[in-house]
Image (cartoon, rainbow, N blue to C red):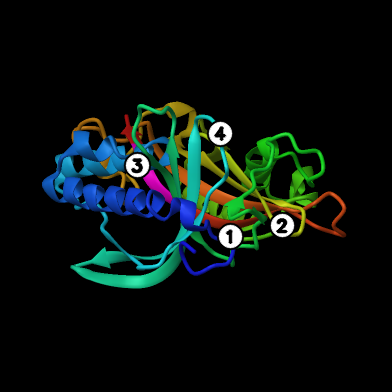
Amino acid sequence: MLGSSPAALGSPGRGVLRPVRSALVCQSRAAAADGDQEAGLNLDAGAAWAQAKAQYAALASTGTAIPGYQYGSKPTFYVPALTGYPQWFLAEVPRATEANGRPGAVVDTLMVFDKLKADEPWTLNGTTALQQRLPALVVHDGYAVTASTTDAALLLRPEVVGATQAAVADEGTANPSAAVIGAGPQTTGLYTAQAAHAGTESAQGLVYQWLLEGAPFPQFELQTADGGALVLYGMYLNTTTEHHNLVTGSPIPVPAGFTPLLAAPTEIGYHAVYANWTYQFAAVDPPLTAANAKISVIAASGAPTFGHAF
């Protein structure tokens, strides 16, 4: 078996998928060390590409080092038995972010890889850090089983999971979507944190707004053993801090991590500052028949990807 879980892909993937992941990790580290943006971005797609693009921009503008990672030696692979393209697979692996050459805390991380066409390479589509344990996934003949984006047997059709999460992140429990979205750091917690920040900015005479919204990234779904689905998707968190009516005022500070992403170091927020993140989430969508069930966002990873001040 490939990996340590009985739900992992069996021997058919041993000669292909482990080298795919390992090669992409090694090539990414080499590209980051060399500052080779073209080579680095060719390894990524979707949310991973958006985050890497910003990291290379920060490297070029301010010399900010691209984050490095150390990975566990025994990833677990979940691979759908797909007959056509695009093809994709999921890897669960312990990962630690490097700081000053030393690894930090180890976090179980989900990594999605995809291959759009037979003559195109495998790319990393997104990574997301688990905040809860990954549920048991359905496996048939050694392969994970995909779920449909329009599956009506689930609490929510997977295609609307992200939008429903966003409704709670944007408006809190006042939004009716809170009836089917579980409380947590990426739902009610995100709303609470953003609302508190808005209050702080208001006390200084500024207007702060935020919006968690969909992004044009592929979405991936696998069936869980209890009849639900694991849904992986990317989203944008867009924020604006501005003077009332965009009148000219004292410079608005650019949030930490976004200064390297400004189009020019001369940008100053006399009117407004835009600071946007790209996120990759994983959520568990329970079966419709489950009693008192709610969507649970179990993994999240985000990074600054756009900044502008004027």
Tell me the kind of residue under disc 2. Answer: Gly
Tell me the kind of residue under disc 1. Answer: Pro
Other residues around mark 2 within 10 Å, as few (<14) / some (14–19) / many (≥20): some
- Dot 2: what SS? loop
- Dot 3: what SS? loop
- Tell me the mark number nearer the camera, choosing from 3 and 2: 2
Residue range (magenta): 301-306
Relative to 76, is 132 on the left or the right? right
CB under 8 Å between discs 1 and 2: no
Tell me the kind of residue under disc 3. Answer: Ile
- The first of marks 2 and 4 along the sequence is 4
Measured Cα–Cα span from mark 3 to mark 1: 27 Å
Quadrant position of the C terminus in the picture? top left
Q: Which residue is mark 3?
A: 252
- The first of marks 3 and 2 along the sequence is 2
Relative to 141, is 275 on the left or the right? left
User: What kind of secondary structure does the magenta stretch mostly adopt?
Assistant: strand
- Disc on res. 83: 4
Other residues around mark 1 within 10 Å, as few (<14) / some (14–19) / many (≥20): some
- Dot 4: what SS? loop
- Tell me the mark number nearer the camera, choosing from 3 and 1: 1
**Residue visible at 32% across and 44% down in the picture:** 254
